[in-house]
Amino acid sequence: MFRQRLFNINVTQKRLDLGKIIVDSEIRARAGINETHIEEYTLSLQNGDQFPPAIVYLVDDENYYLVDGFHRFFAHRQAGRSDILCEIKYGTKRDAILHAVQSNATHGIRRTNADKRRAVEILLKDKEWARWSDRHIAKLCRV
């Protein structure tokens, strides 16, 4: 397990109960949740469509923090599903935040300028991360 944590190797993909996943707004890099997209995803689920796995970080061997797939998560809940396919990564809550600020730059729902701004602000509000160069922060946030 130490090797998995050290190299952040994906543990596995498996279905997780929605109730076991922590939805923490501190980790969500988007400026907000788009209800229209949730409705569209819900209809797609009801029509039998499959979605890529959501990404969660297993922190302290017990807490699954949602990092990528917030719209998919809420659509599953709205569709009456009890679980969702997840890609599970090991790490800390800070690892999860760093992953989140990079999410959706190349896939999923296109990020708005407000989404990009929020990702950068998350790093700038942190005592350690705020000391990083603007160039490094921009590269991490993919802006």
Image (cartoon, rainbow, N blue to C red):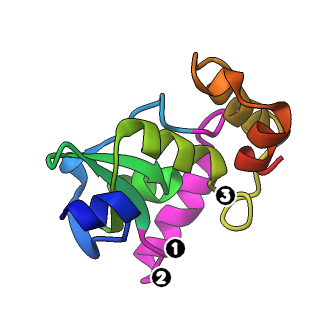
Q: Which sits earlier in the primary sequence, circle 2 or circle 3?
A: 2
Q: Position of residue 136 (x, y in %)?
A: 77, 41
Residue 23 in view of the camera:
no
Drawn side of residue 122 relative to residue 82, left or right:
right
Residue range of the region highlighted in magenta in the rendering: 29-53
State if disc 1 and disc 3 touch (CB < 8 Å): no
Magenta-drawn stretch contains 118: no
Tell me if 62 is positioned left or right of 8 in this view: left
Q: Nearer the viewer, residue 130 or 78?
A: 130
Give me the residue at 62% from left, 34% from top. Answer: 32
What is the distance, in whole Å, between disc 1 and disc 2 at their CAs?
A: 5 Å
Task: Specify whether residue 129 is in view.
Answer: yes
Q: Which residue is mark 3?
A: 104
Residue 118 placement, left or right of 38: right
Q: Can you tell which quarter of the image residue 108 is in?
A: bottom right
Secondary-structure class at tag 3: loop
Q: Quick one: label 3, few (<14), some, or many (20+) residues within 10 Å?
A: some
- What's the amino acid at mark 1? Ser
Question: Residue at left 66%, top 33%?
Answer: 31
**What is the number of the mark on residue 49?**
2
Q: Is residue 44 above or below residue 2?
A: below
Q: Amino acid at mark 3?
A: Asn
Is 50 in front, or is 135? 135
Tag of residue 44? 1
Q: Are marks 1 and 2 in contact (CB under 8 Å)?
A: yes
Q: Is residue 46 magenta?
A: yes
Q: In the structure shown, which secondary structural element does the residue marked by tag 2 occupy?
A: loop
**Which of label 2 and label 3 is nearer to you?**
3
